[in-house]
Structures are given as C-alpha cells and as structure tokens.
Image (cartoon, rainbow, N blue to C red):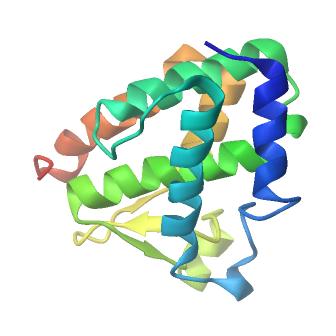
Amino acid sequence: MLNRRSTLASLLLLGPSAYSQPSAASFDPTLPAKAAEAAVRVMAQVNGTKLDYSAESLRSVDSFVLAIRATDKDGTKFEHLLNVLGFYVGEVMARGYQMQWVKPTDAEAKLGAPAYALRHPSGSLVNPIGKVFKLFQNGEEDRTHGLYTSLESLLSQPPR
C-alpha cells in the first residue's frame, strides 16, 4: 500500500510549505480546496487511491495516515502531507455537513483554535487538520471517519 520512496517524492511535489497550516493573519479562503485537490493527486500517485470526497474515502485517508505512522513515528517528515490530508478531510466534512472554512474569532484562537477551521451553521467549530495529526499521533482511536460519523449526533443533523 505504501511505497516510502514515492511518498517522499510526492511530498516534494507539494513544495516546501505549500499547504502547511498558515498563521491566522494570512487566511486564504481558497487554500482548503486547493490543498484538498493536492491530497487527491498525491493519494492517486502514491498508492493509486482515488479520493472522491465521500465519507467512505476517509477510510482510505485513515489507512494511509496509519501506514505512514508506522514508518515515521516523529511525523516531521510528513507534516506538510498531514496538513494537506487534513484539508481534504475538512472538505469532505464541509460538503457533507454544510460547513464553511473560517478564520476563528480572536476568542476562539485564544482557546487554541487553529488558523483554519470549519464552522457549522449551528456555530460549532471543527478542526479536521488537527484530527489528522491526532490520528498520526494516537493511532486507530482517532480515525477521521469516526469523527465524520459522530458529527451527525454532535450536530443533530444527518449529512447531505
């Protein structure tokens, strides 16, 4: 499933910090979609996986993150890739739950909200990029697919 050499080569295609989590001062509303598209390309190149923005595609993202976790517990080599995959996870959530990418408020930022987060119409804030990093750090217990399916009960709304 994971070819380490091609994974690292694909990371180089992203550039040194093309899709890393930027500061709140530089919020660009087009970045999440561009980064998600990069995730689609990278997954296709690395292991032939076709990401289609479905909830089921998150299982492929989870498996891939767990595979790279097995090769590098530190994660520093894969930081940019994890960010890109986080934006992809966020795009799946945004489409499924009518969420929008936002720059969190100053109060939310003081509480630790990232520069890019998803806001649900109810006002709830979700951090899909952070979830991908938690999956990398903690393993199986933090699958992004699990977060997606739990959002239905958390937000009291089924996905579209």
Q: Nearer the viewer, residue 10 or 60?
A: 10
Q: Position of residue 9 (x, y in %)?
A: 83, 37
Residue 16: image quadrant is bottom right
Residue 148 versus residue 2 in the image, above or below: below
Along the horizontal axis of the image, is 87 left or right of 14?
left
State the residue at coordinates (32%, 60%). 94
Q: Is residue 144 above or below residue 91?
A: above
Q: Which residue is at 19% across, 43% downward?
A: 152
- Residue 31 x/y as whole percent: 58, 73
Count all numbered tags in the image, as a single digit: 0
Quadrant of the image containing the N terminus: top right
Q: Residue furthest bottom?
A: 25
Q: Residue at x 36, y 33 (%)?
A: 57
Instruction: Tell me residue 137's x, y (percent).
Output: 71, 27
Coordinates of residue 63 in the picture (x, y in percent): 53, 19
Which of 118 and 2 lies nearest the eye of the viewer? 2
